[in-house]
Amino acid sequence: MKRRTFFALGGACALCGCAGAVHQLPQISDNNLSLAQSEVQGAGGPPARRVLTDEEAGDMMRSALARIRPPADQLCAEMNVGVCQWNIRASANRSMNAGAGPNGLIFINRGVVEYAANEEEVCLVFAHEIGHQAANHVANNQRNQATGALIGAVLMGAVGAAASYRSPYAGTVTRSAADTGAAVGRSIGRISFSKEQEREADYLAAVILYRSNVDLDKARGMLVTLARATGRRDTGLLDTHPAGPERIAAWDQAVAQIRASKGALPARA
Ligand SMILES: [Zn+2]
């Protein structure tokens, strides 16, 4: 049985009771899907990792989060169904993963930043996890609630908060977090969102980026990187986070709709 978290799209319904999306989401067109398939096939082998210092990774996380924070807060208040007090943490884990958990937890691994081609791609990852919280996906998923206590226990003191990078002791914090960060990643890996919830988190991420004036086309590169990385052990993704042309096609449909509506939310489901 595959475990799916941040980058999952598809197939998880059987595991999680088919928790749905808050909004009506656009259908993927065959044309968009075939374009995305060609793009991924032509994109070459596994993505390359940059080597960053703790400080560089932390700087980019803070900067990306700052760019999207006001519109993200506003969107969460506008939706008024989810968790809008977020406990955002950075992990020194070098696998390309991030996640959303109970009590507003959002974590992002340093590996996300190392594989990102630009800050916009990091913005997308933060905005996706914020989307899960804003739409209350964690609480709406019984399986996630069942694992909440375990995750809370593992996280206690486990990862350095993004803010801790400002500390003169930041290097110590992130290094000591490295081992426990892996444990956090494994535990968060037990959270499953449904296919519809994953697609909604991407849609909400695109709305947040649009309203933040973050270049949606640059951010999209993360989805291509993920598609290239799926199944590649050297990225740390393994098979827990399938992401491919379907997710890219859905993103393109979402972005077209968001641009046409000038950043409005779609109708409620
Ligand atoms: Zn997700």
Image (cartoon, rainbow, N blue to C red):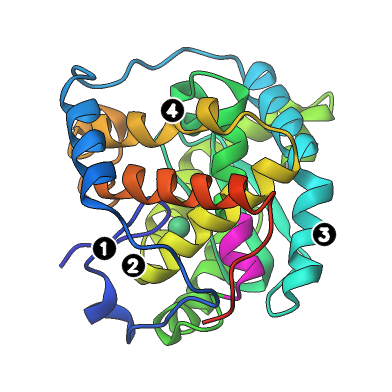
State whether residue 225 is above or below residue 141.
Answer: above
Q: Which mark is residue 195?
A: 2
Between discs 4 and 1, the one toward the N terminus: 1
For the residues labelled 2 and 1, the Cα–Cα distance comes to: 4 Å
For the residues labelled 3 and 2, the Cα–Cα distance comes to: 25 Å
Q: Mark 4 is on which residue type?
A: Gly
Q: Which residues are magenta?
A: 130-136
39 vs 96, nearest the viewer: 39
For the residues labelled 4 and 1, the Cα–Cα distance comes to: 20 Å
Q: Which residue is mark 1?
A: 10
Between discs 3 and 1, the one toward the N terminus: 1
Please give the name of the residue rendered at 28% of the width and 43% of the height, measured from the top-left corner: 32
43 vs 112, nearest the viewer: 43
Please give the name of the residue rendered at 44% of the width and 69% of the height, measured from the top-left corner: 197
Q: Mark 2 is on which residue type?
A: Lys
Q: Which residue is mark 3?
A: 74
Q: Which residue is mark 4?
A: 221
Asked if the magenta segment contains residue 60, the reply would be no
